[in-house]
Amino acid sequence: MTLKTKIILAAGGVFLIAFLFVIAFGKGGAVDLYQLRLERDRVRKVNLDLQRKNQALSKTIERLQHDPDFIENIARTELGMTARDEVVILKKKP
């Protein structure tokens, strides 16, 4: 191998290493792509959780609009209400 060939190969190697460095660490490179994929996966999980909560809320709204037993249960458990014909007996705690 001549000196000229060695210089050309060395320059090509340096260029290749620099090119790979830019691909890996440059703007929009492999590292950025990896971070974007992680962020996408996180956002998808948050989105899925919100969809589940929306479905649960929609079911609750539907029941509140059309299920008197559900409304009664909420009134009794969360609001402590009683029916007109019920008698409340209060007991002191020991």
Image (cartoon, rainbow, N blue to C red):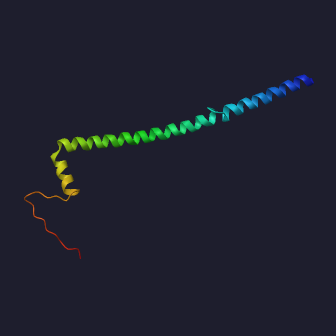
Side of 17 relative to 65 (left or right): right
Side of 51 relative to 33 (left or right): left
Question: Which quadrant would residue 10 be assigned to in this image?
Answer: top right
Image: 83 above or below 53: below
Q: In the image, what residue occupies the spot 11% across and 57% down?
A: 83
Side of 6 relative to 18 (left or right): right
Question: Which quadrant would residue 36 be assigned to in this image?
Answer: top right
Q: In the image, what residue occupies the spot 84% across and 25% down?
A: 9
Residue at the far bottom in the pictured view: 94
Residue 17 percent across, percent down from the top left: 75, 31
Residue at the far front in the pictured view: 27
Side of 89 relative to 61 (left or right): left
Q: In the image, what residue occupies the spot 79% across and 30% down?
A: 14
Residue 93 percent across, percent down from the top left: 23, 74
13 or 32: which is nearer to us?
Answer: 32
Image: 82 above or below 51: below
Q: Quadrant of the C terminus?
A: bottom left
Question: Which quadrant would residue 80 be assigned to in this image?
Answer: bottom left
Q: In the image, what residue occupies the spot 37% across and 39% down?
A: 51
Residue 43 percent across, percent down from the top left: 47, 39
Residue 15 percent across, percent down from the top left: 77, 28
In this rendering, the count of numbered labels is: 0
